[in-house]
Image: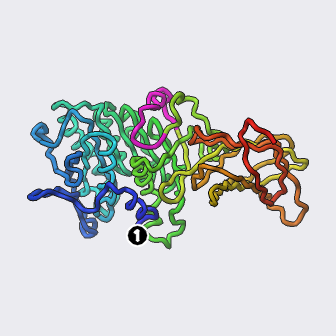
Amino acid sequence: MLPRGLLGLLGLLMLCKGEEESGPGESCDNFTDLTLSHCFIGTSLYVRLLLYTRSNLDCGREIGHHHLSAQPLLNLSLPTAFVIHGYRPTGAPPIWINHIVHLLAAQEDLNIIVVDWNRGAANLNYFTAVSYTREAAHNLTGFIRTMQEEGASLSSVHLIGVSLGAHLAGFIGANLKGQIGRITGLDPAGPMFTSATPEERLDPSDAMFVDVLHTDMNSFGLRGAHGHIDFYANGGADQPGCPKTIFAGKSYFVCDHQRSVFLYLCALNRTCSLTGYPCSSYSDFLDGRCLQCEAFKPASCPVLGYDVGQWREALLGLGQTRVFFSTTASLPYRKLSYRVDMVTWNQYLRWGVVYIRLHGGGNFTEARIDHKRLRFEQYTATRLLAQFDDDLSHIQKISMRINTGNVIGPRYKIRLLRIRFTPLEHPDRPLMCRFDVMMEENTEVAFRPLPCDSRL
């Protein structure tokens, strides 16, 4: 069963073709395709390296581990990205390999080497696959050292590891004394690594720059921070749109974990602009306490993806940074975020959750700020983070409701002396304000926003 959102992703990445293409007389080297019977029997480690460049994007070429200068397609003066998959319990090739190859090639001219260790990763016994990661790392370390001897720079090497492949990448980096340019870990595997020391898993010392994306920390992913920057999608655990019960079958087990790959693919495709906000916790982020990125100025807040140049140096100076963001359940995943600042003036203390709708062009989008009950009292400033699934660029009307859960008593008034909406991802858009709005609890009120330098 395919995870939700996958069909949309396959349709979105138009550059990625579903079948291998080759010219007359050419044969392509494909990723090892095994069956469930191989996994029952067990496989022994065998590492293959499939090279893709802009001249052979649809036809991989297996390259040997020695005499690299004799490989006609391998240009050691270019950057090289290694794509390293994780545990393969069914033996089937990862469905995302062709997509990531095309999207990486669109970033810049580089060598893309898909590390095929399916023979080794394909075992019903997960612990066997874990035991092979050190051996595979030793194999790849030798290959990268050969690259260096023949003219490649270690600083131009980028390892992209998925799940168990993230730790494998970390072992390679550690073998090379942290001189690898970059490691990207996509939801590093948690089982067998929960209590591991930094030497036994991916950690920031494994490369000159390590970025990590977390999507399933409460199951197959690894908790904590393991890079110079760690991105936590929706807090790093349960992802929107993924099944909540075991009755969904396979998708219940893999959806959250696989979401890291789909978010990264979307970020590479630049369809998603997933901005991370430095914060100590996801709860503080949702409370609107962490919506500034002063440490990165004049650059913007960190954005998930390939290009890290504008804020990399700032991150290296900060040590380890945790950043949080929320997503929608499906493509393009990006939410539209506003910082909402209110000053309330009400006679009686009220507790409640807030619903905000933006209206424009005959459509509306709603944000529910209901992760906890908020306190509204006399002459108190309150800051909220409102996140909307849809981007309405021209807002004609805003409606709000403060739901206190009061169903039997009198409805109290809540007066907003001032409310201001600040778009976070679109600093070019104007701030929207409104002054002196009278609300009644549990009742929606609508108003037309004004420029913040205007008053009624």
Question: In the rendering, at what x and y percent does residue 55 appear?
Answer: 20, 47
In the rendered view of the protein, which quadrant contains the N terminus?
A: bottom left
Of residues 155 and 398, the one drawn nearer to the viewer in this rendering: 398
Judge left or right: residue 417 versus residue 198.
right
- Disc 1 on helix, strand or loop? loop
Question: In the rendering, at what x and y percent does residue 9 appear?
Answer: 41, 59
The residue range painted magenta reads: 303-321
Q: Is residue 45 visible?
A: yes
215 is higher (above) or lower (below) than 210: below
Q: Is residue 49 visible?
A: no
Q: Quadrant of residue 279?
A: top right
Number of callouts:
1
Q: Residue at x 17, y 50 (%)?
A: 61
Q: Residue at x 90, y 63 (%)?
A: 409
Q: Residue at x 81, y 40 (%)?
A: 380
- Crowd class of label 1 (few under 14; some 14 to 19; many from 20; radius 10 Å): few
Mark 1: amino acid? Met
Q: Residue at x 44, y 28 (%)?
A: 313
Q: Quadrant of residue 435?
A: top right
Question: In the rendering, at what x and y percent does residue 96 appear?
Answer: 34, 57
Judge left or right: residue 124 versus residue 358.
left
Of residues 442 and 260, the one drawn nearer to the viewer in this rendering: 442
Of residues 25 and 181, the one drawn nearer to the viewer in this rendering: 25
Judge left or right: residue 423 versus residue 163.
right
Judge left or right: residue 101 versus residue 272.
left
Outermost bottom residue: 247
Question: In the rendering, at what x and y percent does residue 423 appear?
Answer: 62, 43
Q: Which residue is mark 1?
A: 1
In the rendered view of the protein, which quadrant contains the C terminus?
A: top right
**Does the magenta portion include 315?**
yes
**Does the magenta portion include 170?**
no
